[in-house]
Amino acid sequence: MRPRYGYGFFSVDSSGEFRQKILFFYWDPDKELYQSISDPSRKQRELEDMRSNMQFFVDSEKILINRKEVRARVVHVDVGFLASARRPYVEFLIIFKGALSRGVNVYENYYEKEVAEYSYKVMWVFPEGAKITRAVLGVPFQVSNDRTLIFTVKKGMETPGYELIEFLIP
């Protein structure tokens, strides 16, 4: 099973809850994942192993909201297939919460640098009325409607190991 593409949709609400829905798309010519989850009891074990593995990676990151460290939790994992047992995807939902305030707020994430094995796209959406004022992502990005930030990492690019998004809440 080889990773082919990733997509992340990250949303922040005015209470300070950050939700990260991440999808990983794979090519699985031998249908290994399909076979491993065909039995319901094996599926539960497989999903729990995936959740545990993702939690390990999430725990290796340092996430700060307004300079205070927060802990992210993997709260959901599921598996599906795109038109074929050879094209599985894995879906994760990760949640963390930080104290936001009126004025400037800062999200920071420290993680291990790596060379991307596959291309992926990320979209951040901040609360209504918020305005993204600065971002340091190590890759080009665009901001639309003041509160939506989008970037793409191409296969083979080195990730910087640090992200910062600064946003204003009126």
Image (cartoon, rainbow, N blue to C red):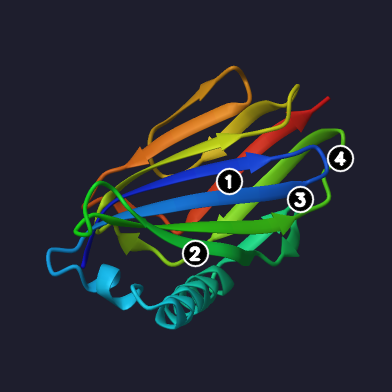
- Measuring from the top left, give residue 94's x and y in whole percent: 60, 58
Q: N-terminal of the two: label 3 or label 4?
A: 3
- Measuring from the top left, give residue 2's x and y in whole percent: 20, 64
As shown in the figure, which amino acid type bears the numbered disc 1? Leu
Q: N-terminal of the two: label 2 or label 1?
A: 2
Q: Residue furthest left?
A: 29
Image quarter where the C terminus lies is: top right
Residue topped by disc 3: 66
Q: N-terminal of the two: label 3 or label 2?
A: 3
- 130, above or below 161, in the image: above
Secondary structure beneath disc 1?
Answer: strand
Q: N-terminal of the two: label 1 or label 4?
A: 4
Q: Residue 164: which numbered mark, if any?
A: 1
- 56, above or below 70, in the image: below
Please state if 60 lies on the left or on the right of 140 as rendered.
right
Q: CA distance from mark 2 to mark 4?
A: 25 Å
Secondary structure beneath disc 4?
Answer: loop
- Measuring from the top left, give residue 44's x and y in whole percent: 49, 77
As shown in the figure, which amino acid type bears the numbered disc 2? Tyr
Q: CA distance from mark 3 to mark 4?
A: 9 Å
Q: CA distance from mark 3 to mark 2?
A: 17 Å
As shown in the figure, which amino acid type bears the numbered disc 3? Asn
Q: Residue 111: which numbered mark, if any?
A: 2
